[in-house]
């Protein structure tokens, strides 16, 4: 006998409401499987986003029973409460339609935090080496696994309170580049993340670290930035 899940899904934009669907329950079913079932079998107009389905692309994040999660690797058995699921778009980002949010400001903040690499070598130079055992490489090790899913960003209260806050992902990215010995824009980057809406606005409550599906620690990265910002910028005064 097939049992059913009762699934409430957000439909609409900022204005909208939850619509209830009955979805057959399967073993090892993920939340993304549930959303795909609804769109393919019940309501083809449902908008959502995913690509890799294996936890690599970062595009499938949604709010599931009130908590931001990557849905392709979240099993229904882990999160359903009394056979019920509530699926909504990520918080802290504008809703385009249904479960799809506009990621523009999320990635604009990566740019504001100088989140792109700038090296000094040309194609004619030998490979730039990063010593695997160096303290800088170890500091950056974890953070470079970020998949840009915005789960941390959607979970951060400071982003909710002050939307100009650069947020955990952009700051985590800045920290990985600050520890990249090949990059030549460190002063510029440190200034960019030390402003009013930068690392010092973080309240260190750690929701980003608690929720990151890749088990990264943006809180630690931000603490590293705070320390560097205070010590370096004070030295330059
Ligand atoms: S630790 Fe900082 S960046 Fe992370 S969720 Fe809390 S306030 Fe946001
Ligand atoms: S730090 Fe973690 S939660 Fe935040 S965007 Fe990267 S992978 Fe996602
Ligand atoms: S679909 Fe790519 S991370 Fe979930």
Image (cartoon, grey):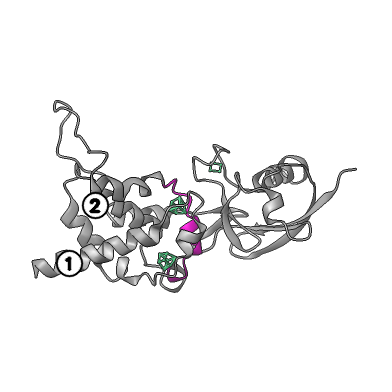
Q: Is residue 47 left or right of residue 213?
A: right
Residue 93 visible in the snapshot: no
Check mark 2 vs ligand 2: CB closer than 8 Å? yes or no: no
For image coordinates 90% across by 43% down, the residue present is 1
Residue 222's label in the rendered image is: none
Q: Residues within 10 Å of mark 1 (few under 14, many from 20)?
A: few
Q: Which image quarter is the C terminus in?
A: bottom left
Q: Is residue 179 left or right of residue 204?
A: left
For image coordinates 30% across by 51% down, the residue present is 139
Q: Secondary structure at mark 2?
A: helix
Q: Which residue is mark 1?
A: 231
Q: Quadrant of residue 54?
A: top right
Q: Which residue is mark 2?
A: 178
Residue 1 visible in the snapshot: yes
Q: Is residue 135 left or right of residue 207?
A: left
For image coordinates 32% across by 64% down, the residue present is 223
Q: Quadrant of residue 15?
A: bottom right
For image coordinates 22% across by 62% down, the residue present is 228
Using the image, determine if residue 56 lies above or below residue 98.
Answer: above
Using the image, determine if residue 134 lies above or below residue 208.
Answer: above
């Amino acid at each position: 006998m097939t049992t059913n899940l009762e699934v409430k899904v957000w439909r609409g934009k900022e204005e909208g409401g939850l619509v209830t669907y009955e979805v057959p329950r399967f073993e090892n079913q993920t939340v993304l499987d549930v959303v795909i079932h609804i769109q393919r079998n019940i309501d083809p107009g449902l908008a959502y986003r995913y690509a890799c389905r294996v936890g690599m692309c970062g595009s499938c994040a949604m709010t599931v029973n009130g908590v931001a999660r990557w849905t392709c690797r979240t099993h229904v058995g882990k999160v359903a409460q009394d056979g019920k699921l509530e699926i909504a778009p990520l918080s802290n980002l504008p809703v385009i339609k249904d479960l799809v949010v506009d990621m523009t400001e999320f990635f604009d903040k990566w740019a504001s935090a100088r989140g792109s690499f700038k090296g000094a070598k040309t194609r004619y130079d030998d490979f730039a080496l990063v010593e695997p055992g160096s303290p800088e490489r170890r500091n950056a090790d974890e953070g470079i696994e970020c998949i840009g899913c915005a789960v941390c960003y959607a979970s951060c209260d400071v982003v909710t309170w002050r939307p100009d806050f650069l947020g955990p992902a952009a700051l985590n990215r800045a920290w990985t580049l600050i520890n990249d010995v090949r990059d030549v824009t460190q002063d510029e980057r440190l200034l960019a993340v030390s402003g009013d809406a930068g690392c010092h606005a973080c309240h260190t409550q750690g929701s980003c670290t608690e929720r990151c599906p890749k088990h990264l620690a943006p809180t630690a990265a931000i603490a590293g930035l705070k320390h560097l910002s205070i010590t370096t910028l004070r030295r330059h005064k």
